[in-house]
Amino acid sequence: MAVNEPRKMSMQRILLAEDDDDMRGFLERELKKAGYDVVAFGNGLEAYERLCEEPFTLLLTDIVMPEMDGIELARRAAEFDPDIKIMFITGFAAVALNPDSKAPKDAKVLSKPFHLRDLVREVERMAQED
């Protein structure tokens, strides 16, 4: 049965790192409604520890977080799993796009505020890039 599922389901494992409790809860709930398996954490360090334990297809991370920021999390995630897709959700898009930030080159950036349909559309688009 899994073989016949739509292509977007090939990107069903999302690791979400967002320190704002309301935003994290909203994103987790809505992405699950859209058919994705989401595991969420409130800081980059906890998210990275989980990434080391099991595979994910997409890292969806805020940039500004306690304990480990999103850029460091993305950099470490890309080193640990070169196949992981990375998307920053942030109010500080210029930071992620700065070449000095050491953010992974092919990471996507979705600036806050954004509409949920924009996020889902970007996640689906990333799944089709395989």
Image: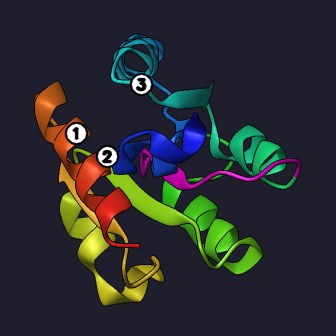
Label 3 secondary element: loop
Say which quarter of the image contains residue 30. Answer: top left
Q: Which residue is under mark 3?
A: 35
Q: Point out the frontmost of discs 2 and 1.
A: 1
| x and y percentages locating residue 121 in the rendered image | 17, 44
Give the distance between the C-alpha atoms of the residues marked 2 and 1, in whole angstroms: 9 Å
Say which quarter of the image contains residue 116. Answer: top left
Magenta-highlighted residues? 53-64
The residue shown at (58%, 39%) is 2
The residue shown at (69%, 70%) is 76
Question: Quick one: label 3 or label 2, which is nearer the N terminus?
Answer: 3
Give the amino acid at mark 1.
Answer: Leu
Above-or-below relation of 99 to 54: below
The residue shown at (48%, 64%) is 85
Above-or-below relation of 108 to 52: below
* Label at residue 52: none
Q: Main secondary structure of the magenta part?
A: loop
Horizontal placement of 51 versus 11: left or right?
right
Q: Which residue is under mark 1?
A: 119
* Label at residue 89: 2
The residue shown at (60%, 74%) is 83
Residue neighbourhood size for the residue with mark 1, other residues' Cα within 10 Å, grouped as few (<14), some (14–19), many (≥20): some
Give the amino acid at mark 3.
Answer: Gly
Q: Point out the frontmost of discs 3 and 2.
A: 3
Question: Quick one: label 3 or label 1, which is nearer the N terminus?
Answer: 3
| x and y percentages locating residue 51 in the rendered image | 76, 51
Q: Point out the frontmost of discs 3 and 1.
A: 3
